[in-house]
Amino acid sequence: MTTRRSDALFALLFVLPALFALGQLVAPGAAIYAPGPRTTFALRAASVTKLMLLALATLYAHLCARGLASAHDQVASAWRRLSLGFLFYFLGQASLGWYQLVKGTSAPFPSIADAF
């Protein structure tokens, strides 16, 4: 991934949601933060953003482990474990998101998300 694409992806996935949250702290009574259809959209956007950031964390931790594999086995092993942890966290959040975003209900307990 080129630096320009990486910077754009960072801006899209981190800076914009952070600005949205900061705006709510500065002007909590603004119309954009009023309950209604926008609230549902904001929750969906936040859920998708969280899943994308977790997927990127998994990918980059895996790439770090692969890049360090031959030179530093202990460090690469730590990055592999971190990548695996991010992957399981992503899978749990994705299965929880299925209930919340697609089905529109809360997840039953226990659910498949609890396995991760």
Image: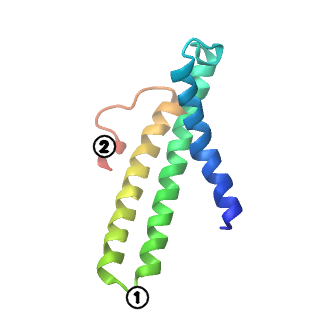
- How many neighbours does mark 2 have within 10 angstroms: few (below 14), some (14-19), or many (20 or more)? few
How is this picture coloured? Answer: rainbow
Q: Quadrant of residue 77?
A: bottom left
The disc label shown at residue 114, or none: 2
Of residues 77 and 90, the one drawn nearer to the viewer in this rendering: 77
| Amino acid, disc 1 | Ser
Residue 49 on image: x %, y %: 55, 42
| Residue at horizontal 31 percent and vertical 70 percent from the top | 78
User: On the image, numbered disc 1 is attached to which residue?
Assistant: 70
Q: Earlier in the sequence, mark 1 or mark 2?
A: 1
Which part of the image, by quadrant, shows the N terminus?
bottom right
| Residue at horizontal 56 percent and vertical 32 percent from the top | 44
| Residue at horizontal 39 percent and vertical 56 percent from the top | 86
| Residue at horizontal 58 percent and vertical 28 percent from the top | 42
The disc label shown at residue 110, or none: none
Of residues 99 and 54, the one drawn nearer to the viewer in this rendering: 54
| Amino acid, disc 2 | Asp
- How many neighbours does mark 1 have within 10 angstroms: few (below 14), some (14-19), or many (20 or more)? few
